[in-house]
Image (spheres, grey):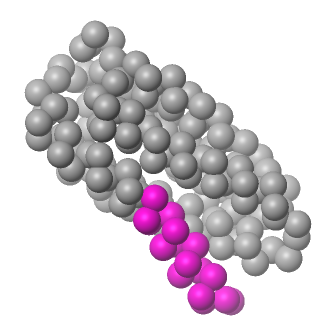
Amino acid sequence: MDIIKLILSIVICQFAGILGSLFNIKSIPKWYSKIKKPRFNTPNKIFGPVWTLLYLLMGISLYLILTSGKDITLPIIIFSIQLVLNIVWSFLFFGLRKPFFAFLEIIILWLSILATIIIFYAISKPAAYLLIPYLLWVSFASLLNYSLWKLNK
């Protein structure tokens, strides 16, 4: 086990989460708390722990790919794209307060996560499986994003 690669992989993913949360911090009390929400809206206190766990799983998944000993150029590019798209969603939804554009972007994010899972699966099945909770959560987030847009347009 290459502990340095494991730690760096986790830190990179957690850092993406921190960057995304910079948009949330100011927007939640000033904007998000005041908009109409669907009945299935998750309490705000759930999001932090869930995302922390998801970023941890992403980091472990990334580590498995990095240490696979296979050609990982394309998988790392696709993984990086989905990680950037994750941050961009927070910017669009919370930073710009544009649920419609965030919804369009989250569809692209979802597809990029699926692409990451597929390409990781060819290299490491466990790495791909670790991303399934992320895909499921973003599926839920997509529905929530859509509902928020429709309720507040």
Magenta stretch in the rendered image: 1-16
Instruction: Identify the residue at image location x=31%, y=52%.
Output: 21
- Residue 32 horizontal side relative to residue 108, left or right: left
Residue 35 found in image quarter: top left
Instruction: Identify the residue at image location x=19%, y=32%.
Output: 32
Q: Is residue 106 magenta?
A: no
Residue 6 found in image quarter: bottom right
In the depicted view, which residue is nearer to us: 151 or 42? Answer: 151
Q: Is residue 118 above or below residue 34?
A: below
Location of the C terminus (image quadrant):
top left
Q: Position of residue 52 (x, y in %)?
A: 38, 61
- Residue 1 horizontal side relative to residue 104, left or right: right
Q: Name the dominant secondary structure of the magenta segment.
A: helix
Q: Residue furthest front?
A: 96
Instruction: Identify the residue at image location x=66%, y=54%.
Output: 79
Q: Position of residue 19 (x, y in %)?
A: 38, 56
Location of the N terminus (image quadrant):
bottom right
Q: Is residue 11 above or below residue 1?
A: above
| Total numbered labels | 0
- Residue 117 appears in view: no
Instruction: Identify the residue at image location x=30%, y=21%.
Output: 148
